[in-house]
Amino acid sequence: MKLLSILKSKDLHYAVALIAIAFLVNIIPSKIAIALGIPVFIDSIGTILAGMLGGTLPAVIVGFCSNAFNSISDLPTLYYGIISILIGAMAAIFQQKGYFRTLPKIIVMVLMFAILGGVLGSVLTYFLYGYDFGEGVSAPFAIGIHEHLGLSKFTSQLVADFIIDVIDKIFVVAAVIITYHKIPLHIKTHCSRVFLFDPNPVAQLEADGTRAIKHSLLRRVVVIVITAEILLGVLASITGFVLYRQQSIEKFTDIAHGLTEAASVAVDTERIDEFIEKGRKAEGYIDIEQKLYKMRDGFPQALYLYVYRIQPDGCHVVFDLDTKEGEKASQPGDLIDFDPSFEPFLPQLLKGEPIEPIISDDQYGWLLTVYKPLKNSSGKTVAYIAADISMGEIITDQAEFFIKLLSMFFGVSILIMSIMLEFVNRRIVHPVNRMASAAIHFAYNMEQDRANDMHEIKSLNIHTSDEIEHLYKAFTKTCMDSIGFINRLEAAAERIQHMQDEIIINFAEMVEARDTSTGNHIKKTAFYVEAIARELLKEGKYSDVLDEKYIEKLKRSAPLHDIGKIAVSDLILNKPGKLTDDEFAIMKSHTTEGTNILAKIEANTNDTMDYNYLKESMEMAHYHHEKWDGTGYPTGIKGEEIPLSARIMAVADVFDALVAERVYKKPFTYEKAMAIITEGAGKHFDPTVVEAFCHISEKLYAERTTLNNKV
């Protein structure tokens, strides 16, 4: 899998099909609407649908390609591609946040789409074409708003565009939702998987309930890329603006040079003095003036065209044309003071030398002026012909270029950025997240779970041919090594536990061997304790305490319940008759002595043994002679104050003592033993434990022979 998953033939087919179908869904309905004269655009259905199905990348591609296709017949459409791209990206975000599911959010979504398409589109139109009304479907509506509400042309057009776009987006979103719900689930799922897009994301949580990822790597990459794009866009725009400004000035300078060059041919340089003195009364003056008007009008960018004789006392008017807006010009022979911006050039002008174009901002406005010397037949400069180009024309031209540059740059940038982010997501973020997810869910507790999880890790099969693949291989090796180490630890722990159990059982049997009347009492009681606990679990009793782990601890703890008898004299343990009060007091001390012995073991082993196991052993040893009604020993506690382990052991201990033969008595029959047990329910024993024991006691009694053979 050396190539991206999207390059698999099946995935590629889905990706191409999604983009192609969404593109056609954009183009065909909009063309039909235009042909039928329907006052809506419905040209973003495919873009939004692509965003819902596959996320940002296909939506951006569809939006950009749709505008690029439409620009073949209408070039300015390409400049609006940024709007289509933003609508597609926003659709993907809305889908992830579930906005397509509830009516209030759908309304918000329609308004947001309309702001992009209507408001932003209207502002873009203003910068491209100026204040006047457009020629689109909203133009009649905008004119009506302007005439009836008195709003400015720009505001009227903006309001009209927004309202029309709200109507358009209502139809679009309705069509998208209906279409989306008609698409089979497996197609939706596969489209989202192809583009690694989750339309219904569920936040991954850690074990403690916190979010698994607080700061997404992809989000940081997005921030970095967007920041870089903005900085690059600003730099490119400034550079482009400066270059275009210089180019525009050069272009308008060439226009001014062309006008002055053409106009200079019409002026009779031998009669300049006569024209200044007689003005329009001079023969041929008006004809020359008319020619100058025609030439000036042939250059739309030209604002002023005039001929001056430069003298030390000022500028003597030879020809000066009225402006296109009707502003009256100076009359022949008038003397005009030098403009301050021309003072640095006066020495050259007085000498009749050519000067560089001048940009000035004075009472006549912000102008680009080109002066051309007019020479007579002897080669002497007798006047200057000048053409003024309004810098406002240059600024308008620059603004239009700047907006086109920005819209094109950011449209293409978003497309490139989406592709880059898809690449980063596939090659970095997605593989890392898959490894992280596998690590988070890796189960160390059971061998089969570890084997299954290791299989899952190997099935990730990450091949990116870079550091990510190297990390994956290191991660896989670490997991395999960890599993091997854990298996060895578990085997060692199992051997140690088995050894501990054997030592303790042998120790308990040594204690038991001193009491010739008990037989295999500790092993039988352990068997009864486990059976009673499992019956309680089966019946759902004490479910807040009982589980498999707890039962295992009871089974291991039970043999230690009489370990304190090691402190009791053999004479008392094996006395065939009734014990005296003093002897019985010593016998009762085996509960506290057993607890002390186990506590000392726990302290000396420094937590190398299972503390919970020893805790149950200590509780069972200490409390197994306590009674439900509080008349037991050594503490006299009652009811559920007595640990459950001790309450279970009490039934098992007494039952085995009753049915077993002791030096001081014959074994009781099963019926008599059970009568004593049931009679003791609520007095000596926990009634719930007795009830569970009654359900299995006959079976346990029948198994005593088999148990004797086993033990």
Image (tube, helix red, strand yellow):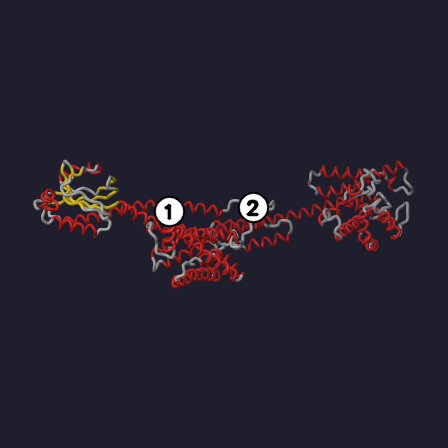
Q: Residue furthest front?
A: 148
Q: Residue furthest right?
A: 577
- In this rendering, does residue 690 appear at all? yes
Callout 1: SS: helix
Q: Is residue 35 above or below residue 645?
A: below
Residue nearer the viewer, 591 or 550: 550
* 97 relative position to 291: left or right: right
* 315 relative position to 626: left or right: left
Instruction: Specify the amino acid type for callout 1.
Output: Gly
Residue 432 in the image, given as x and y percentages of width and height: 51, 50
Question: How many residues crowd around disc 2 within 10 Å: few (fewer than 14), some, or many (20 or more)?
Answer: few
Q: Earlier in the sequence, mark 2 or mark 1?
A: 2
Residue nearer the viewer, 312 or 336: 336
Residue nearer the viewer, 333 or 239: 333
Residue nearer the viewer, 402 or 173: 173
* 614 relative position to 706: left or right: left
Instruction: Specify the amino acid type for callout 2.
Output: Arg
Q: Residue at x 75, y 47 (%)?
A: 554
Residue 19 badge: none
Callout 2: SS: loop
Q: Quadrant of residue 614?
A: top right
* Residue matched to label 2: 211
Residue 217 in the image, given as x and y percentages of width and height: 49, 47
Q: Is residue 27 above or below residue 586?
A: below
Question: How many residues crowd around disc 1 within 10 Å: few (fewer than 14), some, or many (20 or more)?
Answer: some
* 254 relative position to 96: left or right: left
Q: Residue at x 86, y 41 (%)?
A: 573
Numbered disc total: 2
- In this rendering, does residue 412 appear at all? no
Residue 512 in the image, given as x and y percentages of width and height: 82, 44
* Residue matched to label 1: 233
What is the CA distance from the residue labelled 2 to the residue labelled 1?
35 Å
